[in-house]
């Protein structure tokens, strides 16, 4: 027999009658025919016998597949002698027939032989173009959803970047507070200064990477969504065969898309500027301040001892004068400052809002303009969960103060506010060149049964007598 005939016979004997390819893990049936184990298993897909041989149709009462190792070796030899030619696009790798149908259950392309196999008898098999048109519509709906996800991702990304910038500004502002406060307390507080700066840096290192990670994660999600959208847009432009090729992987990645919103990071600083013993030191300059009724707005109600003020529901019939605030809900303290250091404390309790500070004595008390330094007012305004000043943006509070200490150093141009409860710095104005006469200012802002109450001085240098 000629060598080509032997080679052809070897190929024929080493080929599975089901997949028409070289045997892979060949097994023998009771009737003596050989098939790939996976091929015969798919062919005998029913749970119970009898089972018909695909070649001779002889029935077997039960599965009795015996491995055929010599045939496996022969198939390997044939594979080496005659390696299978590359499967062209659009041709079934198993049967070398054109791909002309699509299985909706297994989401793969089928040739005519695949479609006739027992494996797909109960499956939803449709013509190529019909299946492509249906899946194209689904992909277009998926694209609409993914584009919306992309918009949300970009929005989250912008918010995350804005939050990072805001957090950095807050950190920087608090760092400046710490540095300025410790500079005034000379060398014996340098160690405390460094400790607080370290805590603030640790908080920055703890929170800022999380915020940056949020932003980076959203950038990655946006990039991934953009890539998937571009891929699907390109796939939708392909003919049916290209659109459906490997569609299972594309549909799986579409289903796996899930936008992860950024982690919610609290924006309140845990680290506060607290100098041990500072409030006790400032109390050396404590003056006994009481309210001046001649300056009180007609809506304000003063206590008999002139230490408390609240905003009433009715306007009182009081004589109008240049000294009286109207319409602003303010009242001044009786003390006048033109030099020196001065400190006083105000019980604010659980009031939702208030304003405290100092102003020049010659301010216009009849206008409703902004109470800013440019108009002669240096005040701190508390609004529920944060405080602000016309000179700076708002700063969130973790624990609103119940008692506020105000310290004025006239010559140094220094005005600062403290929470007496824990001794922490609430706010410090930029260094200012004060001029003229300054007076304490109090404003309850809104109606509340809780008044603003000036705490009594307990004696010490700098105290002023009550007139």
Image: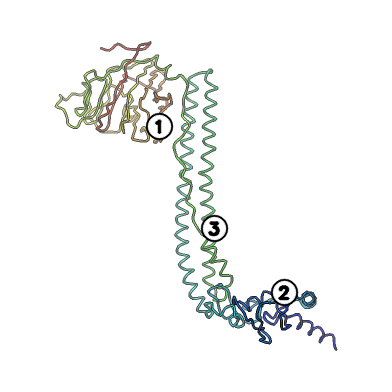
- Which of discs 2 and 1 lies nearer the camera? The answer is 2
Q: Quadrant of residue 361?
A: top left
Query: Dot 3, how many residues are within 10 Å of its Cα: few (below 14), some (14-19), or many (20+)?
Result: some
Q: Residue at x 70, y 76 (%)?
A: 65
Q: Earlier in the sequence, mark 3 or mark 1?
A: 3
Q: Earlier in the sequence, mark 2 or mark 1?
A: 2
Q: Earlier in the sequence, mark 3 or mark 2?
A: 2
Residue 100, horizontal then vertical, whole percent: 57, 81
Q: CA distance from mark 2 to mark 1?
A: 73 Å
Q: 411 or 293: which is nearer to us? A: 293
Residue 347, horizontal then vertical, whole percent: 32, 24
Q: Residue at x 39, y 36 (%)?
A: 394
* Residue 170 circle label: none
Q: CA distance from mark 3 to mark 1?
A: 42 Å
Q: 464 or 391: which is nearer to us? A: 464
Please give the residue where the numbered disc 2 appears in the rendered image: 24
- Which of discs 3 and 2 lies nearer the camera? The answer is 2
- Which of discs 3 and 1 lies nearer the camera? The answer is 1
Q: CA distance from mark 3 to mark 2?
A: 39 Å
Would you place residue 65 above or below residue 213 in this image? below
Quadrant location of the C terminus in the rendered image: top left
Q: Residue at x 47, y 37 (%)?
A: 169
Please give the residue where the numbered disc 1 appears in the rendered image: 399
Please give the residue where the numbered disc 3 appears in the rendered image: 224
Q: Quadrant of residue 106?
A: bottom right
């Amino acid at each position: 027999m000629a060598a080509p005939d032997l080679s052809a016979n070897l190929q024929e004997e080493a080929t599975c009658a089901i997949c028409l390819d070289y045997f892979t893990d060949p097994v023998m049936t009771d009737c003596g025919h050989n098939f790939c184990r996976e091929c015969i298993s798919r062919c005998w897909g029913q749970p119970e016998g009898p089972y018909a041989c695909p070649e001779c149709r002889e029935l077997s009462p039960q599965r009795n597949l015996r491995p055929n190792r010599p045939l496996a070796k022969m198939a390997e030899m044939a594979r080496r002698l005659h390696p299978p030619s590359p499967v062209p696009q659009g041709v079934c790798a198993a049967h070398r027939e054109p791909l002309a149908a699509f299985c909706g259950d297994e989401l793969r392309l089928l040739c005519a032989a695949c479609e006739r196999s027992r494996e797909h008898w109960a499956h939803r098999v449709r013509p190529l173009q019909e299946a492509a048109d249906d899946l194209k519509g689904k992909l277009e709906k998926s694209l609409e959803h993914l584009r919306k996800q992309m918009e949300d991702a970009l929005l989250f990304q912008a918010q995350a970047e804005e939050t990072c910038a805001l957090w950095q500004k807050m950190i920087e502002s608090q760092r400046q507070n710490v540095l300025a406060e410790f500079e005034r307390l000379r060398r014996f507080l340098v160690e405390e200064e460094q400790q607080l700066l370290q805590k603030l840096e640790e908080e920055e290192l703890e929170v800022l990477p999380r915020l940056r990670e949020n932003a980076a994660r959203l950038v990655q999600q946006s990039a991934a969504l953009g890539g998937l959208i571009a891929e699907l847009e390109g796939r939708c432009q392909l003919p049916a065969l290209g659109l459906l090729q490997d569609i299972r992987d594309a549909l799986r990645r579409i289903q796996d898309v899930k936008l992860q919103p950024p982690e919610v990071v609290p924006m309140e600083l845990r680290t506060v500027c607290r100098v041990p013993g500072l409030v006790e030191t400032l109390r050396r300059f404590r003056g006994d301040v009481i309210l001046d009724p001649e300056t009180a707005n007609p809506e304000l109600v003063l206590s008999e001892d002139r230490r408390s003020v609240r905003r009433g529901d009715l306007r009182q019939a009081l004589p109008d004068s240049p000294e009286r605030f109207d319409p602003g809900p303010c009242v001044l303290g009786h003390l006048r400052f033109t030099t020196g250091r001065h400190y006083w404390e105000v019980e604010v309790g659980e009031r939702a809002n208030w304003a405290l500070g100092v102003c020049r004595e010659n301010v216009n008390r009849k206008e409703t303009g902004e109470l800013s330094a440019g108009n002669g007012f240096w005040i701190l305004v508390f609004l529920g969960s944060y405080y602000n000043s016309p000179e700076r943006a708002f700063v969130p509070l973790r624990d609103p103060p119940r008692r506020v200490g105000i310290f004025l150093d006239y010559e140094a141009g220094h005005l600062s506010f403290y929470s007496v409860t824990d001794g922490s710095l609430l706010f410090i104005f930029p260094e200012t060149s004060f001029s003229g006469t300054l007076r304490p200012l109090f404003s309850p802002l809104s109606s509340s049964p809780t008044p603003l109450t000036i705490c009594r001085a307990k004696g010490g240098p700098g105290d002023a007598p009550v007139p």
